[in-house]
Image (spheres, rainbow, N blue to C red):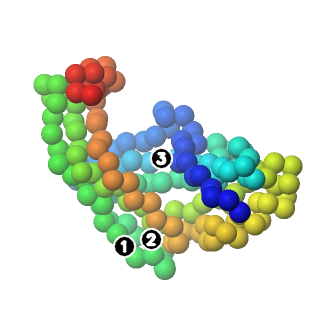
Amino acid sequence: MTGVNSTLELAKPASEITLNETNLVGELGPGMTLPVKVHLENPFLGKNCFVGSSTTPIIWPLTTGETNPPAPNTKIKGKAGGLEFLEEGSIAELKGNVLVENAWSAPKAAGCGGILSFLVDPIINAQLGSTVAGRNTAILNNTIFIGAAAAVRENNELNP
């Protein structure tokens, strides 16, 4: 098979992302929960090959704290990063933030190979391996801006 491009996409509207600022900064419990899907693409797989979907998303309750996954995964820890206030305190910026999750499961791939998906999906799933909880890890290194949309837009325009 040729190389496969994979793109992480939101599986639900952005309004369904949950954010808990106290947990993010305090390195406790879920700080951000993301409903995602993975889009797998190459000429053979077509444009409709996904792991997860809008109806069956992968749910990542990401934390800056410590995880408690089922075996064989072991605990990992995220990091709140440095907190700085911008725009006269109207925006909180978390630099060097690390969100982690390693207790999640994922649905099987679906829609791969177009009309041959009944043959291709099982092959893709065999290549992907286990999608059960305790065998997957997500680590997002990032900078998070928390604030009113207008303040974030203004800051981004002034500091491209």
Alpha-carbon distance for marks 1 and 3? 20 Å
Looking at the image, do the residues carrying marks 2 and 1 touch, with CB atoms under 8 Å apart? yes
Q: Does residue 48 sit above or below 1 in this rendering? A: above
Task: Say what amino acid the circle numbered 3 marks.
Answer: Leu
Alpha-carbon distance for marks 2 and 3? 18 Å
Quadrant for the N terminus in the image = bottom right
Q: Does residue 120 sit above or below 146 in this rendering? A: below
Give the image location of residue 113, x and y in percent: 79, 52
> Which image quadrant for residue 100?
bottom left
Task: Say what amino acid the circle numbered 2 marks.
Answer: Pro
Residue 69: mark:
2
Quadrant for the C terminus in the image = top left
Give the image location of residue 43, x and y in percent: 72, 49
* SS of the residue under disc 2: loop
**Sequence order check: which comes first, mark 2 or mark 3?**
3
* SS of the residue under disc 3: strand
Residue assigned mark 1: 75
Judge whether residue 50 can be spotted in this image: no
Residue 34: mark:
3
